[in-house]
Image (cartoon, helix red, strand yellow):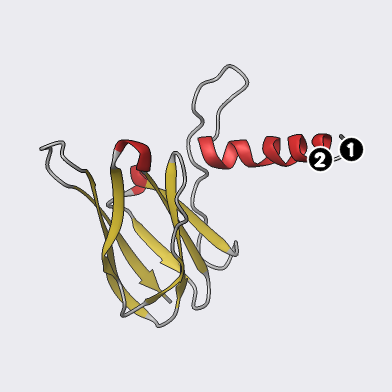
Amino acid sequence: MEGKPAIAAVALLWLPLACGWRSAQGREVPAPTLLPAGHETMVEVRAADAGREIRLASGQLLSVDLPAASASGYSCWVSDPAGHVLEIEREPARAILSRTWIFRAAESGRDELRFDCHQELSGEPIRRYAFQIQVE
């Protein structure tokens, strides 16, 4: 019985990561503003950031969080990994509400990072998310 408070504490810390950021009133809070490269160790982007230019310093990490729900068959995958400027550090584990990829800025230059998302058997078109990556 002694381990249950520790498990509850870990669950409370993990919950905002799994469910997104919400205010005390339950409203979704916008993702943090992206800072210029070099001012943080990891830049975090979401589906709403698609189309934006993402500037990274060499060696900096990029976290891309996209919606996915494996129970409903909605999944996302990398269609173009921007291999000229990025290296995949970590592919997502099967998560309930989202999937997060971690990339490392490897080479200076510019490339496009693209993802495709689709719900199997839905008949709906594939949704594409693209991010313009600039590594300095």
Which one is closest to the eye, mark 1 or mark 2? 1
The residue pinned by badge 1 equals 2
Q: Is residue 127 visible?
A: yes
From the image, which quarter does the N terminus lie in?
top right
The residue pinned by badge 2 equals 6
On screen, residue 81 versus residue 88, left or right, reads left
Residue kind at label 2, given as amino acid type? Ala
Q: Residue at x 55, y 20 (%)?
A: 26
Name which quarter of the figure residue 88 lies in. Answer: bottom left
| Circle 1: element type | loop
Residue nearest the viewer, comparing 130 with 7: 7
Marker disc for residue 114: none
Q: Cα distance, mark 1 to mark 2? A: 8 Å
Percent x, y for residue 17?
A: 57, 42
On screen, 118 above or below 77? above
Percent x, y for residue 91?
A: 43, 63
Name which quarter of the figure residue 84 lies in. Answer: bottom left
On screen, 50 above or below 38? above
Q: Dot 1 surroundings within 10 Å: few (below 14), some, or many (20 or more)?
A: few
Percent x, y for residue 106?
A: 44, 80
Task: Kindly give the residue lying farthest to the bottom in the view shown.
Answer: 107
Q: Residue at x 60, y 65 (%)?
A: 41
